[in-house]
Image (cartoon, rainbow, N blue to C red):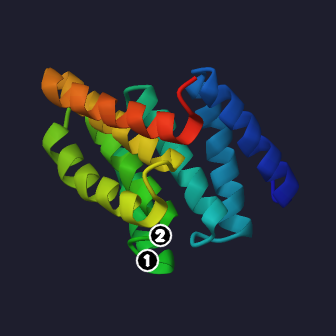
Amino acid sequence: IEHQDTLLSMFILAGLYYNQNKYSEAESLLRKVLEGRLRVLGQEHSDTLLTKVHLAMSYVNQHRQYDEANKLLTDTVEMQSQLFGEEHPWTLQSMSLVADAYEKQGKYTEALELLTPVIELQREILGEEHSDIFTSRQTLFNIYFDLKDYVKCEEILNEIIIAHRHRFGND
């Protein structure tokens, strides 16, 4: 499979499967899309990198192949850092997903060490109300919830509520 439109349609279908928690179906399609995008677009293309991230997260959400998932994610972050810079929104988003993967594996120290500076950079670069910050804060909440630090969980949720109200209003 080499036509970009076909690969895009397959990627979208994999996303549909992923959003329905059909991770094995998503994984199967994403493997094919990644093979095609590597062949057609190369390893440095943003669509190829995005496919790697989604494939890695399908592994993580199936609670398996963590080593492969971590490798895909860290390779993607390294490539994005080289191509776009460490403070580019795509790089920060991928770093946040690495932290999410670490959280799901119980690697809380690693997740916090990575996620804390990412959130600060997202605040500076994207602003408090950007959707990427909400995703990162959700991961941060999950880490502290897993650690049973409910005081920190409450702080994070209050920050999220304030940001949501500012963005969407009080209704």
Say if mark 1 contacts mark 2, CB within 8 Å. Answer: yes
Q: Residue at x 23, y 32 (%)?
A: 155
Callout 2: SS: loop
Residue 16 lies, with reference to residue 20, above or below; the image says below
Q: Position of residue 78 (x, y in %)?
A: 39, 69
Q: Residue at x 38, y 30 (%)?
A: 64
Which dot marks residue 88? Answer: 2
Q: Residue at x 20, y 23 (%)?
A: 146
- Mark 2: amino acid: His
User: Depth check: 114 or 64 in front?
Assistant: 114
Left or right of 109 in this view: 159 = right
Left or right of 72 in this view: 109 = left
How crowded is the residue under tag 2: few (<14 C-alpha within 10 Å), some, or many (20+)? some
Callout 1: SS: loop
Estimate the spatial distance between the alpha carbons at disc 1 and disc 2, rounded to whole Å. 6 Å
Give the number of callouts: 2
Q: Position of residue 59 (x, y in %)?
A: 45, 35
User: Depth check: 20 or 65 in front?
Assistant: 20
How crowded is the residue under tag 1: few (<14 C-alpha within 10 Å), some, or many (20+)? some
Quadrant in which residue 40 is drawn: bottom right
Which dot marks residue 108? Answer: none
Image quadrant containing the C terminus? top right
Q: Which residue is mark 1?
A: 85
Left or right of 119 in this view: 25 = right
Q: Is residue 66 visible?
A: no
- Mark 1: amino acid: Gly
